[in-house]
Amino acid sequence: MSEFIPPAKPIIGDEERAAVDRVLRSGMIAQGPEVKAFEEEFSAHFGLGRACVAVNSGTSGLHLGLLACGIGAGDEVIVPSFTFAATANSVALTGATPVFADIALDDFTLDPASVEAAITERTKAIMPVHLYGHPAKMVELREIADRHGLKLFEDAAQAHGAKLNGTPVGAFGEFAMFSLYPTKNMTSGEGGMVSAADETIERNLRLYRNQGMLQQYHNEVVGLNNRMTDIHAAIGRVQLTKVDGWTRTRQENAAFLSANLEGVVTPPVAEGAVHVYHQYTVRVAEDRDGFAAALKEQYNVGSGMFYPVPNHRLKPFQVDVHLANTEQAALECLSLPVHPSLSQGDLERIVEAVNALAKAGA
């Protein structure tokens, strides 16, 4: 059988190894000059026009962003249920309550009408996810947030470089979080980057990530230890020089798949949107799980099921809410390989496999 095509493949090269060695030789390993440089370079590279704060994980970034914006006990934050649990977890960790709204099936991001219907007197913010690398409906969500006096945050974990109407994701909300986990479009080994809309939010982020202090032993708030190390920042700085090329390859791979796949619903791109294809997610109408198993067993093609159990049905939340599109997506969504390491032969085998299985199941 042909070699296995993995659903994701982190790319770490000699330049990243050299950068780590440079830091180790310097003796400055904790948060230091590499972190500062990475923060500045990240903001400049993606054109965010705002300060960025590096942290030790994407989840930490969401948690600290919420704290920095004053979210806490008694508050409600509207989030999608069709996302990784960290989105809702981060809200719950502040003492606030995540309120789940439905998604639109075109781009798998928050449906503005469902968001508006979920607003109560306790709602303080809306936090969409730019899922799979496609920007959420930020124009409509900003209008709703402004009309109701709510804050707007961004979970941009999967969306480095995505844009909407020329504005990069990460520049819409009061804060935005980018994940730097190994399988994301770029990585620092582990980590997160948070963009801040103003100096107060930035300062709060820096306080909360470092035990509540900017000056040693002068703690201003009850903080956490969520710092990024210079080792991780050095990896991230190298990856910044490569991510644009990788993104173009992802977009080219996605274009090939969309032009050639049959029998599944391929992911559309909204007008004015730049999709960076962290995942290339199709919808399989019948027996998605069996389809995925056959891809692996018959064609040695890997795939991913994100997210078969919506957040509102997870044990920590268990909310009785009707989210029809979320439930349909959880049953039908299947992410096919789209990463930059795919060869043309890999892409052709993915198309052959999907089309053959779709036809056989028709």
Image (cartoon, helix red, strand yellow):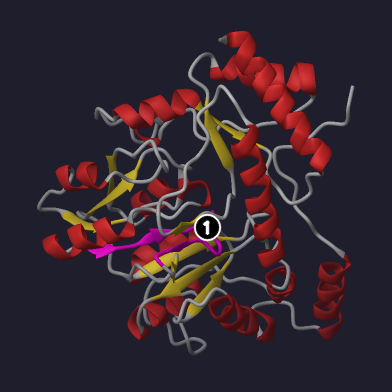
Q: Which residue is mark 1?
A: 159
The kind of secondary structure element at disc 1 is loop
Residue type pointed to by label 1: Ala
Q: How many numbered badges does the structure rendering display?
A: 1
Q: Quadrant of residue 305?
A: top right
Please state the horizontal and vertical placement of residue 213, each as a whole percent of the image.
46, 82
Q: Name the residue located 76 percent from the left edge and 33 percent from the top edge.
A: 348
Question: Horizontally, is 155 left or right of 226 in the view?
Answer: left
Tell which of 13 and 232 is nearer to you. 13
Question: Horizontally, is 215 left or right of 100 in the view?
Answer: right
Q: Is residue 118 visible?
A: yes
Q: Name the residue located 83 percent from the left edge and 77 percent from the top edge.
A: 24
Q: Name the residue located 30 percent from the left edge and 53 percent from the top edge.
A: 95
Tell which of 107 and 321 is nearer to you. 107
Residue sticking out furthest to the left: 121
Q: What stretch of residues is rendered in magenta? A: 151-165
Tell which of 352 and 320 is nearer to you. 352
Please state the horizontal and vertical placement of residue 139, each as a whole percent of the image.
28, 61
Q: Quadrant of residue 124?
A: bottom left
